[in-house]
Amino acid sequence: MAAQQSFENHAKVVPAYHYFTSLLIVANLAYRLYEVVAHFSAETLMSALVAVALFMLFVYARVFALAVQDRVIRLEMRLRLLELAPDLRPRLGEFTMNQLCSLRFASDAELPGLARTVLADKLNDRKTIKRMIRDWQADLQRA
């Protein structure tokens, strides 16, 4: 069984994606660029362009998944805050994505007070906000 999630271990790393696949894609790109410089031809140029496209696909696949995840988190957190801290309804638009993404780890009991503190102190650093959480709620369904 996995260890309980906390600030120290909450970052999601998929070794096959973050290390193995990224290393292969970067190594392929570097080699293809070297080939263009060392042995320029239409074939090596096309190969390098495909390597660039593969690298861009790798990066954007992650960026797009994280953007969708952030939008879902924003919606989830607004709904939680409406339920748990209805007095914050007029201020929901003031929360930044960093604040909402950080606050998602707070328990229902802790969230209203922490949300008020984050707004009052204008905290926007994800690590700072996450470190303030005392009753950490795991998020195991992240992309």
Image (cartoon, rainbow, N blue to C red):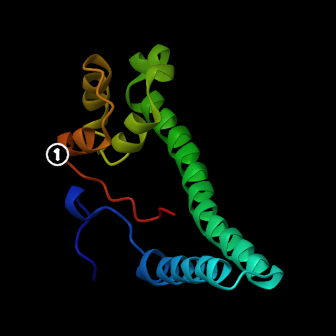
Say how many tags the image has. Answer: 1
Residue furthest right as drawn: 42
Q: Position of residue 130 (x, y in %)?
A: 26, 44
Looking at the image, which residue is at 29% across and 45% down? Answer: 107
Looking at the image, which residue is at 62% across and 83% down? Answer: 38
Q: Secondary structure at mark 1?
A: loop
Looking at the image, which residue is at 32% across and 21% down? Answer: 119
Q: Is residue 73 above or below residue 44?
A: above
Question: Circle 1 sits on which residue?
Answer: 134
Image quadrant where one finds the N terminus? bottom left
| Depth check, front residue: 4 or 27 | 27
Q: Position of residue 65 (x, y in %)?
A: 59, 58
| Rendered image quadrant of residue 36 | bottom right
Q: Is residue 87 above or below residue 100?
A: above
Residue 4 lies left or right of residue 45; in this view the side is: left
Looking at the image, which residue is at 52% across and 63% down? Answer: 143
| Depth check, front residue: 129 or 138 | 129
Residue 36 lies left or right of residue 87; in this view the side is: right
Q: Is residue 120 above or below residue 34?
A: above
Q: Residues within 10 Å of mark 1 (few under 14, many from 20)?
A: some
| Depth check, front residue: 40 or 43 | 40
Q: Position of residue 98 (x, y in %)?
A: 40, 38
Residue 60 lies left or right of residue 108; in this view the side is: right
Q: Amino acid at mark 1?
A: Arg
